[in-house]
Image (spheres, rainbow, N blue to C red):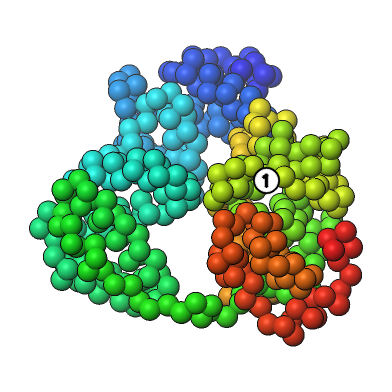
Amino acid sequence: MFEELYSGEAARRRHRSAPFADERERYLRHCADLGGTRATLRAKSAALLWLSGRLKPSASQGIDLKQLHKIAQLRETKSATAARRLIDIARPWLRFLGWWRVPHVELRFQHQLDQYVVWMRERGLSPLTIECWQARARMFLQWCEQTGRHLCTLQPSDIDHYFISEGTGRWSRVSVSSIASALRAFLRFAATQAACDPRLASTIQRPRRYQQEALPYAPDWTDVRRILADTETNTSKDVRDRAILMLLAIYGLRRGEVASLRLDQIDWQGRVLRIFRLKRRQAQIYPLLPSVAEALARYVDTVRPQAPCPEVFIRLQAPWGPITPSSIYNIVNRRFIALGIHVAHRGPHALRHACAARLLSDGLTLKEIGDHLGHRSTSATQIYAKVDIRSLREVGDFDLGDLQ
């Protein structure tokens, strides 16, 4: 690998004669296979060369972040940015070798938390729900540890104190309601394991929330069209974003569904798009509209890196890998901010709301809208259909082209 990066024999000899040459070369080859450019690989190689001279022969036994910080401080430059850059390069290398020592924080209730995750999976909860409820439970259990409380002796007053001490001034009423539901579910599970009083979960009362109480936060369809028009350029970023935004706004997909979309789910010849709905746990077939097909084909043919991944959307910069749901949120959020579109929420779910509003304005029933969005019940669809008639009439005046 060093022969490919350096033309001078002296430079090659310097890199080969330094400690851990084989380990550095294997990692650089791995980065090259993931699409790393020559300039990026040379920068990594230089940083790892300097680092290798400061590592002890026992480095294979494990290096943690504290040790790595001490080594970074030995560089001649005192720039915090340079030290950070060295750490950012060194840590993936150490992970690749299996030498990175991850700080392990032992949670006293970790066993119950692991069992809770298994219990949720067995009941078919979606990965995002499991992740959210696990995080809520972990947050509560960490608070219990910090305050010296135990599950087996918890009282309703302890839970009241948790919401008061942690939530006052930080959690909205909606957040309090969500956390209360997640905590109640966890305590019910814990009760089945005889880990807490079985009556404890029933003492948690959520704030009263009224059906359809919140104002609709779907952006106007004119704003959706502005967002899509903003991507009509030849830059790689805009070509990719346009395909993502059209899937969110036209099909009402969730961000996780877009992130997990695979190439084999697009039937170009049959003009069909197969989506695995997260909530329904089954595939759903959509017609592949010409405008969406064009956007996807342009991205796949001209922008998508040749990465060995089945997912459609890949990071634009090496190391190449599937785009994450959080990245999709950032893509949408940046578009809202850049165009000065003021709505209560500026993420992918806002486009899902806009999709529901558009379908309602076209005269579709709640059942038809729910089928389009992948809902299991009409009551879930009503949340997305909270729109005022005046705005619907304004949206209906626009020519939607092949979206009608």
Identified at 54% across, 51% down, the residue is: 279
Give whichever of 311, 290 is nearer the camera: 290
Identified at 30% across, 41% down, the residue is: 114
x and y percent of residue 33 in the render? 63, 24
The quarter of the picture where the C terminus appears is bottom right
**Count of numbered tags:** 1
Give whichever of 137, 78 is nearer the camera: 137
Give whichever of 356, 260 is nearer the camera: 356
x and y percent of residue 65 in the render? 34, 40
* Residue type (three-letter) at the residue carrying disc 1: Gln
Q: Is residue 100 left or right of residue 317?
A: left
x and y percent of residue 299 in the render? 79, 43
Q: Quadrant of residue 167?
A: bottom left
Query: In the displayed structure, would residue 398 be above or below residue 113?
Result: below
User: Is residue 382 in view from this perspective?
Assistant: yes
x and y percent of residue 332 in the render? 65, 60
Identified at 77% across, 71% down, the residue is: 363
Farthest bottom residue? Answer: 390
Q: Is residue 30 left or right of residue 179?
A: right
Task: Tell me the SS state at disc 1.
Answer: strand
Q: Quadrant of residue 6?
A: top right
Number of other residues with Cα within 10 Å of mark 1, as a class: few under 14, some 14 to 19, many 20 or more: some
The quarter of the picture where the N terminus appears is top right
Q: Is residue 285 left or right of residue 126?
A: right
Query: In the displayed structure, would residue 104 be above or below residue 244?
Result: above
User: Is residue 139 in view from this perspective?
Assistant: no
Identified at 55% across, 64% down, the residue is: 380
Q: Is residue 255 left or right of residue 108?
A: right
Give whichever of 209, 57 is nearer the camera: 209
Question: To which residue does mark 1 refer?
Answer: 284
